[in-house]
């Protein structure tokens, strides 16, 4: 009997603390509203399929495992679709130290709520701070 009591007291000691269900219910609507506002903001800054980017000045940066084009006006960050032009940009980026400034043209595509850029032209104009 005493072993049973000791075993039960150990289980009680290692059991996770109870969470307040009321607190979780109060937090859920706020999270949903915040998520809706974030999705609305993303939708407002999203470019439409087929939009043309013409001579946009900006930089390239790796976001996760994707190369992205960040225009100076920073209205919409565009994930770059793989093609020969992207390969040339990556080679230039890897062989340089510092942040390179580019003039980019291409076509915007949409997939699952995100924008992608199919680059047609990319011209290196210099380094930031030059």
Image: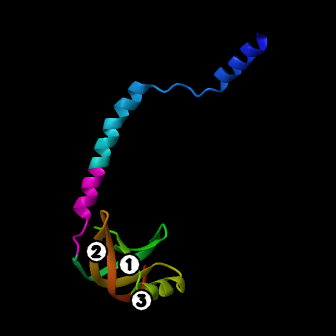
Please name the residue shown 34% across and 84% down the image: 119
Tally of numbered discs:
3
Query: In the displayed structure, would residue 36 be above or below residue 93?
Result: above
Where residue 45 sits, quadrant-wise, is: bottom left
Location of the N terminus (image quadrant)? top right
Which mark is on residue 81? 1
Residue ID at (33%, 73%): 116
Q: Which residues are magenta?
A: 37-49
* Marker disc for residue 84: 3
Between 128 and 27, which is closer to the camera in this rendering? 27
Q: CA distance from mark 2 to mark 3?
A: 17 Å
Mark 2 or 1 closer to N-term? 1
Q: Main secondary structure of the magenta part?
A: helix
Location of residue 9 by image quarter: top right
Where on the picture, by quarter, is residue 68? bottom left
Can you identify the residue that label 2 sits on?
Answer: 109
Measured in 3D between alpha carbons, the distance from the residue under mark 2 to the one under mark 1, in whole angstroms, is: 9 Å
Give the camera-side residue of 90 and 101. 90
């Amino acid at each position: 009997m005493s072993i049973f009591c000791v075993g039960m007291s150990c289980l009680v000691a290692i059991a996770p603390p109870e969470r307040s269900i009321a607190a979780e219910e109060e937090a859920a609507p706020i999270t949903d509203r915040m998520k809706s506002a974030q999705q609305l903001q993303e939708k407002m800054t999203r470019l439409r399929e087929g939009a043309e980017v013409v001579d946009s000045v900006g930089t390239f940066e790796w976001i996760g495992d994707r190369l992205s084009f960040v225009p100076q006006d920073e209205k919409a960050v565009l994930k770059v679709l793989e093609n020969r032009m992207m390969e040339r940009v990556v080679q230039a980026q890897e062989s340089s130290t510092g942040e390179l400034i580019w003039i980019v043209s291409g076509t915007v595509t949409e997939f699952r709520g995100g924008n992608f850029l199919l680059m047609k032209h990319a011209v290196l104009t210099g380094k930031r701070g030059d």
